[in-house]
Image (cartoon, grey):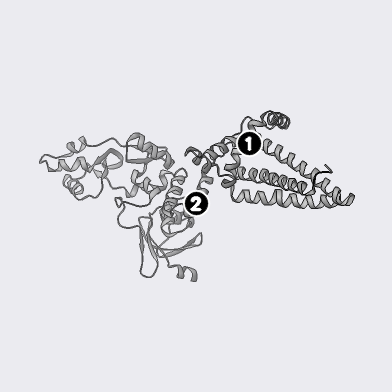
Amino acid sequence: MHDIPLSALFTTLAFLFVLSAFFSGSETALMALNRYRMRHKARQGHRGARLAARLLERPDQLIGLILLGNNLVNILITQLATYIGYRTFGDTGIAIATGLLTIALLIFAETAPKTVGALHSERIAYPAAWIYSGLLRLLWPLVFIINVLANGFLRLLGIRMNALQRAELTTDELRSVVTEAGPLLPARHQGMLVNLLDLERTTVEDIMIPRSEIVTLDIEEDWNDVLEQILSGSFTRLPVIEGDLDRVLGFVHMRDLLPLTYRESFGPEDLRQVITPAYFIPEGTALNRQLINFQKEKRRVGLVVDEYGDIEGLVTLEDLLEEVVGEFTTDSPTMGDEVLPQPDGSVVVDGGIHLRELNRSLGLTLPLDGPKTLSGLIVEYLEHIPEAPASVRIGGVIMDIVQIKNNTIRTVRFPAPEAERKA
């Protein structure tokens, strides 16, 4: 080697540094790849993505191959740099070469390449996948022996390699991915996806129309009143009862009912002929499950019942879909708007409004793990039914109780933000 020019030795050393940088940077790039984007590109026919996906299916083999090449190159760098130092400065050159080599390896073969690999993972990983696929075929016997020895040692430590975990996301993690998508998704689509993921956390009790607000068609009332309600009603479907909601006969669709009203002989028995059986939903049913149940049963409306079979409320498919896409219908059994902004900046709210809807409308964070309505929340907090007018602060939010009727809080006023800050 004494006959080899120093220029050739330095050139070889620089080439070995490039190889070391390649192994270090490509390892980081492959491990930093977005697995979902990689699989998407692979399904679209991207050859580099396919090769990368295949390599990452067995990370033990890939890491073994990369470390085999990297360690071999680093050993050669150490030997060659030591020889160059000795040949140039004698024994002192060995110490100089060791110090310079440590800094050079750390900067040019580790830190810089790995930083670039992390920042530009796809640009580096996909071309590198071609090289590693060829190297894996070439060095397969050696890689196999290394993996057998390494995996055998891991088994001694109780670590099994036969159940490599795929990259999977929990619902909360997927919600974070959607929320952090930023400009990649329009804000409206982002909100819809988050709402869709939230369906499993929300139950039918959170969105149902309370029993006291359900509009019904009572077949035992005066028939003229029934006819007037049918002709002047604004609802597509109505539950038909016999005197009391607990004696529900089923549901009637106005599409089937209105043609019958033009008959001179139209009476209660004709009404009974177009009633469809009631569909009951157990309390506590998650909205994602209920959406599937509605589809399976080909239903659009159901009555929520408790464990004793008592009717608690009513849920429609429209109410459920509004949890995903937002409000798009005014077909609701409640009377009037539930949230009314006032000229002074305050907001008057119906006491029966669902807390989820109130939080969404006013940007509040009132607790949802207890009562479902604003009235219920205030009564639970105060532990008694207050007398109007009265004020209460819950979770830092000031509320003025305006009207109480039949032991129920009917109207609540939320002061303007400026007035609330002064309070």
The residue at 11%/39% (across/down) is: 265
Where is residue 358, by image quadrant? bottom left
Total number of numbered labels?
2
Answer above or below: position of 258 versus 96.
above
Separation (CA) of disc 1 from disc 2? 28 Å
Out of 143 and 85, give the one closest to the viewer: 85
- Mark 2 lies on residue: 181
Secondary structure type for disc 2 = loop
Out of 141 and 76, give the one closest to the viewer: 76
The residue at 72%/44% (across/down) is: 16
Q: Is residue 241 left or right of residue 398?
A: left
Q: Is residue 170 visible?
A: no
| Quadrant in which the N terminus is drawn | top right
Secondary structure type for disc 1 = helix
Q: Amino acid at mark 1?
A: Pro
Q: Is residue 61 visible?
A: yes
- Locate residue 182, reporting x and y percent: 49, 54
> Which one is in front in this view, the residue at disc 1 or the one at disc 2?
1
The residue at 39%/40% (across/down) is: 291
Q: Amino acid at mark 2?
A: Ala
- Mark 1 lies on residue: 59
- Locate residue 93, reporting x and y percent: 86, 51
